[in-house]
Image (tube, grey):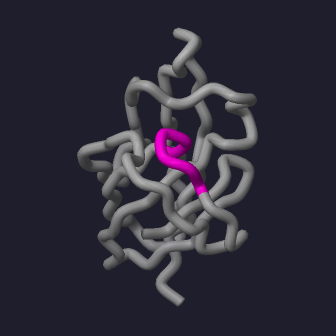
Amino acid sequence: MTEISASEAIVVHPSDSQTYALDFTPILHGRTISAVGSVVADSGFTVGSAVVNSDAFIHDKTGETVPASHAIQFSGSSGVAGTDYNVTVTATLSDGSTVARVMTFEVRST
């Protein structure tokens, strides 16, 4: 699984098909994610089922632990090489508020 923060882009290969996670920890301030609102991608980039993480995991870039209910995980398949795609991930938080973050996937063949 590849984890990223909303402020960074992830470079993927056109043949990639894997699970990604968006870590919301920096904006939760004591809250948790109670539900996935939606995961919507630009045309040409395919996203699959999305879930709130039920177990803690180690963030592969920071090495920090992402607690359960702090990230949204979804499957994604890359698009056309040389194209950037935005994926908007919306979460409902434990206090009833809704937050959205945009992830950018840069599809590159090299």
* x then y, percent, for residue 101: 61, 35
Compared with residue 28, is residue 68 higher up or lower down, i.e. above or below?
below
Q: Residue at x 36, y 44 (%)?
A: 43
Closest to the observer, 53 or 85: 53
* x then y, percent, for residue 89: 49, 36
Most extreme residue toward the top, as rendered? 96
Compared with residue 49, is residue 18 higher up or lower down, i.e. above or below?
below
Q: Is residue 82 magenta?
A: no
Q: Residue at x 32, y 63 (%)?
A: 77
Q: Is residue 52 left or right of residue 48?
A: right
- Look at the image and tell me in which quarter the N terminus lies: bottom left
Q: Main secondary structure of the magenta part?
A: loop
Q: Residue at x 53, y 70 (%)?
A: 82
* x then y, percent, for residue 24: 62, 41
Most extreme residue toward the left, as rendered? 49
Q: Is residue 26 left or right of residue 100?
A: right
* x then y, percent, for residue 79: 37, 63
Q: Which residues are magenta?
A: 66-71
Compared with residue 72, is residue 76 higher up or lower down, i.e. above or below?
below
